[in-house]
Amino acid sequence: MNNQDLIEKWYLEMWNEWKTDIFPEILVPEITFRGSLGQEKKGYNGLNEYMDYIKSAFPDFHNEIELIITEKNQSFAKLKYSGTHKGEIFGCKPTNRKIEYYGTAVFTFENEKIKDVWVLGDIFGLMKQLE
């Protein structure tokens, strides 16, 4: 799989369909993940915890890839996130509102798998929608 294929599986299968069983296929076991919601996680268990956190707040969380740029062992992705606010996040009780915000991610690859992901989302834009 090339970098773009791995990123597409990361978002379209792992995140959009909550498929954690594909971790070994696309991720190194010691993956590091820095999410824009202020958390850093390591390994499959840490990433699974973060996904559960997002899923509890936005059960229908959806990622739309708008752009992928690759150079050597790194790729940049521009994304649009959306979902329905059904659970508490940032101390905000569920509003049942549809949310939409943008973000970027930088991926680092090793041995044809994802080794590190650093995400920066428009948290201010998200928070404005939760008020």
Image (cartoon, rainbow, N blue to C red):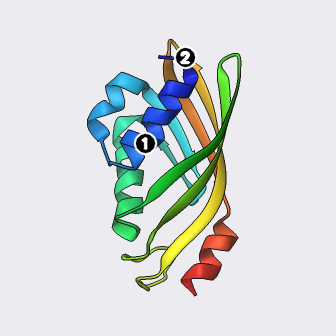
Image quadrant holding the C terminus, namely: bottom right
Q: Where is residue 57 in the image (x, y as percent from the top left)?
A: 40, 70
What is the secondary structure assignment of the residue under circle 1?
A: helix
Name the amino acid type tagged 2.
Glu
Q: How crowded is mark 1: few (under 14 residues within 10 Å), some or many (20 or more)?
A: some
Q: Which residue is drawn at 46% across and 73% down?
A: 89
Residue occupying the far top of the picture: 111
Q: How crowded is mark 2: few (under 14 residues within 10 Å), some or many (20 or more)?
A: few
Q: Which residue is drawn at 42% across and 60% down?
A: 61
Q: Mark 1 points at which residue?
A: 12
What is the secondary structure assignment of the residue under circle 2?
A: strand
Q: Residue at x 34, y 66 (%)?
A: 56
Q: Can residue 14 be seen in this view?
A: yes
Cα distance between the residues tagged 2 and 1: 21 Å
Residue 97, placed above or below residue 20: below
Q: Where is residue 38 in the image (x, y as percent from the top left)?
A: 58, 58
Q: Mark 2 points at which residue?
A: 110
Residue 104, placed above or below residue 114: below
Q: Where is residue 2 in the image (x, y as percent from the top left)?
A: 53, 18
Name the amino acid type tagged 1.
Leu
Image quadrant assignment for residue 108: top right
Camera-side residue: 9 or 107? 9
Mark 2 or 1: in front is 1
